[in-house]
Image (cartoon, helix red, strand yellow):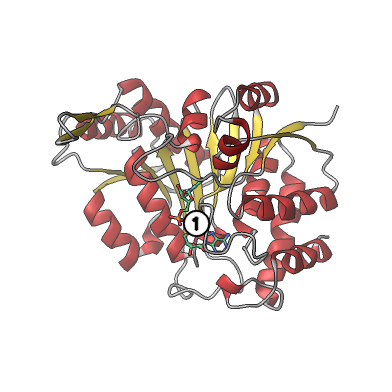
Amino acid sequence: MSQKVSLIRGDGIGPEIVEATVRVLEALDVGLQWEEVRAGSGAFEDLGTPLPEETLLSIRRNKVALKGPLETPVGTGFRSINVAIRKHFDMYANVRPAKILPGIETRYSDVDVDMITVRENTEGAYAGIEHAIPPNRSAAETIILCTRWACERIVRYAFEYAQSSGREKVTLVHKANILKETNGLFLEVGQSIAREYDDVKFEDLIIDNMTMQMVMRPERFDVIVTTNLFGDIISDIAAGLIGGLGLTPGANIGKEASMFEAVHGTAPDIAGKGIANPTALMRAAAMMLEHLEMGEEARRLQKGLNTVLEEGESVTGDLGGDASTEEFTDAVIAALD
Ligand code: NAD
């Protein structure tokens, strides 16, 4: 029986890059069956809710979703639907690889950048425990939630990931010098779990030092494990090191379901123009194929992408080319072995 995948086209450039990715997956003939469901601002406008029940039921049934970016109103309006889906299914590990791809010119082209950020995805500053204090929002409070249990499972995930993928080091990033309770707990758990994995090196770094080190010596990082807020920021720095948001995929892994997406957002400035770079979502699709134990198909997809990026003739504007999303996709399909 073929694997069903919940497919969310999303907002902004979402429908364009999802269409491109579906075309490549169909050319790979992996036999996936799409179950299309809605989420985001478009769903809110058309259906009166940014996250219809049907979408949640579909993801629960299929256990795997491929998702385009979703718009989140800033400051007011509904809360992030990305965060809501991750929390609903307890997708606790957000995994974002950052490796310089062939043919991509970055400021770090001479450096061996190849790091994976494993971000705690369910609590921290993003637990959604916040309120305004009256009168007139004269103050506001957000609570950072940190449970020993969630710290343990994310740190363990990072070590298991390092071990199973032959990586050498885990760097735990925190702010335990100031956030002594929440980040202190995260660090304490990390140090304790690290002792169980003597074949993987361990270090911890304070977030401010970490951001500087990432820019100055990115080659020293391998697997990074961190809290929700720091992981959000660090993974964007990592995306910048390898050539931008258009290239970086992300996986949200949980026991109940997993969701694969690009790290970037809806790119409203270029939406509808047919010029978005679908590489990040295609690489997220390759991570999804790996997750579905279709490693050979994942390899073919990544190889096709690498060929087009390396040749550099059919790349999109963000990579210095002038190809449309469709032309780039045609080239990737032509390069599949
Ligand atoms: P963004 O990632 O959408 O855009 C930042 C810049 O990168 C823009 O200049 C954009 O044109 C460019 N860019 C992004 N993806 C690109 C691609 N594939 N090809 C070429 N250029 C690309 O960030 P933003 O403007 O801060 O956010 C816009 C919206 O996206 C917001 O509503 C935000 O909440 C949402 N968002 C969603 C997700 C998600 O669904 N996972 C992630 C981040 C932001």
In the figure, is residue 60 to the left or right of 206?
A: right
> Which quarter of the rendered picture does the C terminus lie within?
bottom right
Residue 202 seen from this side: no
Name the spot of residue 315 as percent of width and height, x first. 66, 72
> Which quarter of the rendered picture does the N terminus lie within?
top right
Q: Is residue 193 shown above or below 298?
A: above
In the figure, is residue 178 to the left or right of 267?
A: left
In the figure, is residue 333 to the left or right of 101?
A: right
Query: How many labels, in total?
Result: 1
Q: Decide if ligand 1 comes within 8 Å of the CB at mark 1.
A: no
Q: Residue at x 44, y 48 (%)?
A: 168
Name the spot of residue 141 as percent of width and height, x first. 20, 32
Name the spot of residue 34 as percent of width and height, x first. 77, 36
In the image, 215 versus 44, the foreground residue is: 44
Name the residue carrying label 1.
Answer: 98
In the image, 240 versus 321, the foreground residue is: 321
Kind of residue at disc 1: Ala
Say few, some or many: other residues with alpha carbon within 10 Å of mark 1 (under 14 / 14 to 19 / 20 or more). Answer: many
Q: Say which quarter of the image contains residue 164.
A: top right
Q: Residue at x 49, y 64 (%)?
A: 244
In the figure, is residue 300 to the left or right of 12?
A: right
Residue 41 seen from this side: yes
Q: Say which quarter of the image contains residue 61.
A: top right
Secondary-structure class at tag 1: strand
Q: Residue at x 23, y 56 (%)?
A: 209
